[in-house]
């Protein structure tokens, strides 16, 4: 295995068969029909390889968000072999440091750069404006440019599926969420989790504690403790570490893994993990780039595209709930079900989606309220 040094671009040399074997299957549906660049007869000289780099906000060992990006990086390194050379820098803060790292990556010859956290947005925009020959991919922002595409996973679908399980397991009828940074994506996930729980029992209430960071295990743990002290017995989180699950394990309540499979961190407390697989999207982008067909755009893949799933549902979860999760998944795949289908009320009693109306992408990207049953208000919302 390569040594990983913080904030320096490290070349990927070896690839552990073990880590690749651990990857979930790639969805192929959205891959372009056109073949990738023709395979060279002999191994391409180093200079001909497409250099691809990844910038991460937390350590690759976070067990969640960044861990999953890293698994996908390893998967594409194996898939594309000597056509590409990949590297990564971990624990890069969402500050001017990020711009420096991006420029450094470009200076080292990387022509495709993935910036994998929302708060990198302005730094990606600045670097990309000066580096027109480099393609940038930004998760999970909204600002595009000729050489900047944005992409995301439909994490709210996984949150809804987890919510179904939570709704079937809560005894106190109060579920909770440890929330990270107050952006629509996170508010949407909180709401989707609660909508899933209320699809089992509409009387379920919810509490939220914000930690205002993506990765802060001690704070995540404190937030989980305060939720439990407030009567919550099933928790979800939108932070990057397994701290909430570990706290649940210690306190004898339930929680979920998010982004990665976190089952190993809390065997008794773990009810399921809402896992993102970035591999299908990363494969598509590399294939397009090798074929000279890279394009800017806004890509949002979910259960349908094999980018999102709820895995390792615990044995103790009633079969009825497991069947309900399976039905919702099938509906998401064949388009017969959408999480955000009215009637949906906010927590002030205002109708936000009328009966039968499905929230479109613009609606989903602007969610800035709590649904019925969630205590309090979204930070900064009027
Ligand atoms: N950076 C670290 N974790 C996350 C996440 O869950 N969402 C977004 N948008 N950025 C992140």
Image (cartoon, rainbow, N blue to C red):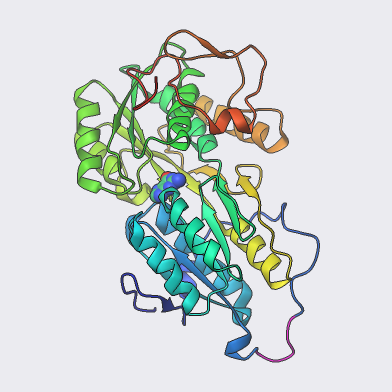
Residue 168, horizontal then vertical, whole percent: 43, 23
Q: Residue at x 64, y 11 (%)?
A: 355
Residue beneath the point at 35% across and 16% down = 173
Q: Residue at x 53, y 75 (%)?
A: 110
Residue 173 in the figure: left or right of residue 122? left
Q: Magenta stretch: dominant SS? A: loop
Q: Nearer the viewer, residue 159 or 167?
A: 159
Query: Which quadrant holds residue 267?
Result: top left
Magenta residues span: 39-43
Report whether 381 appears left or right of 227: right
Q: Quadrant of residue 169?
A: top left
Relative to 99, residue 346 above or below: above
Q: Is residue 42 left or right of residue 86?
A: right
Is residue 348 magenta-colored?
Answer: no
Q: Relative to 235, is 200 on the left or the right?
A: right
Residue under the point 19% across and 37% down: 222
Q: Quadrant of the C terminus?
A: top left
Seen from the viewer's position, the closer of residues 347 and 276 is 347
Q: Is residue 89 visible?
A: no
**Residue 201 placement (x, y as % from top left):** 46, 14
- Give the residue furthest to the front: 130
Up the image or down, 128 lies above or below 166; here it is below
Percent of width and height locating residue 221: 22, 40
User: Is any atom of residue 50 visible in this view?
Assistant: yes
Task: Tell me: residue 284, above or below residue 122.
Answer: below
- Looking at the picture, how far across and down is residue 132, in whole percent? 60, 67
Q: Quadrant of the N terminus?
A: bottom left
């Amino acid at each position: 295995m390569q040594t990983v040094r913080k904030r320096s671009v490290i070349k990927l040399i070896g690839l552990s068969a073990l880590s690749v074997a651990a990857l979930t299957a790639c969805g192929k549906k959205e891959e372009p029909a056109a073949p990738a660049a023709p395979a060279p007869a002999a191994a391409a000289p180093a200079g001909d390889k497409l250099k691809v780099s990844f910038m991460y906000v937390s350590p690759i060992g976070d067990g969640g968000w960044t861990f999953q990006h890293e698994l996908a990086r390893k998967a594409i390194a194996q898939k594309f072999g000597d056509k590409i050379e990949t590297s990564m820098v971990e624990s890069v803060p969402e500050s001017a440091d990020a711009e420096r790292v991006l420029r450094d990556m470009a200076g080292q010859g990387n022509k495709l750069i993935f910036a994998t956290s929302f708060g990198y947005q302005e730094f990606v925009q600045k670097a990309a404006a000066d580096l027109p020959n480099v393609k940038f991919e930004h998760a999970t922002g909204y600002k595009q440019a000729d050489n900047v595409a944005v992409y995301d996973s439909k994490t709210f679908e996984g949150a809804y599926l987890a919510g179904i399980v939570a709704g079937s397991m809560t005894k106190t009828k109060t579920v909770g969420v440890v929330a990270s940074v107050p952006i629509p994506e996170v508010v949407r996930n909180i709401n989707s989790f609660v909508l899933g729980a209320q699809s089992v029992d509409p009387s379920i209430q919810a509490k939220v504690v914000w930690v205002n960071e993506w990765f802060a295990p001690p704070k995540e743990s404190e937030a989980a403790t305060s939720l439990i002290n407030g009567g919550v017995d099933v928790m979800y989180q939108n932070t990057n570490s397994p701290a909430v699950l570990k706290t649940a394990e210690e306190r004898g309540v339930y929680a979920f893994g998010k982004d990665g499979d976190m089952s190993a961190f809390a065997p008794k407390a773990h009810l399921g993990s809402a896992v993102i697989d970035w591999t299908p999207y990363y494969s598509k982008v590399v294939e397009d780039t090798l074929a000279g067909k890279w394009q800017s755009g806004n890509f949002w893949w979910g259960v349908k595209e094999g980018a999102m799933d709820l895995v390792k549902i615990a044995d103790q979860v009633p079969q009825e709930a497991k069947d309900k999760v399976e039905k919702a998944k099938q509906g998401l795949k064949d388009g017969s079900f959408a999480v955000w289908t009215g009637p949906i009320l906010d927590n002030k009693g205002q109708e936000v989606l009328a009966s039968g109306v499905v929230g479109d992408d613009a609606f989903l990207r602007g969610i800035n309220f709590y649904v019925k049953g969630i205590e309090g208000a979204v930070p900064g919302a009027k």
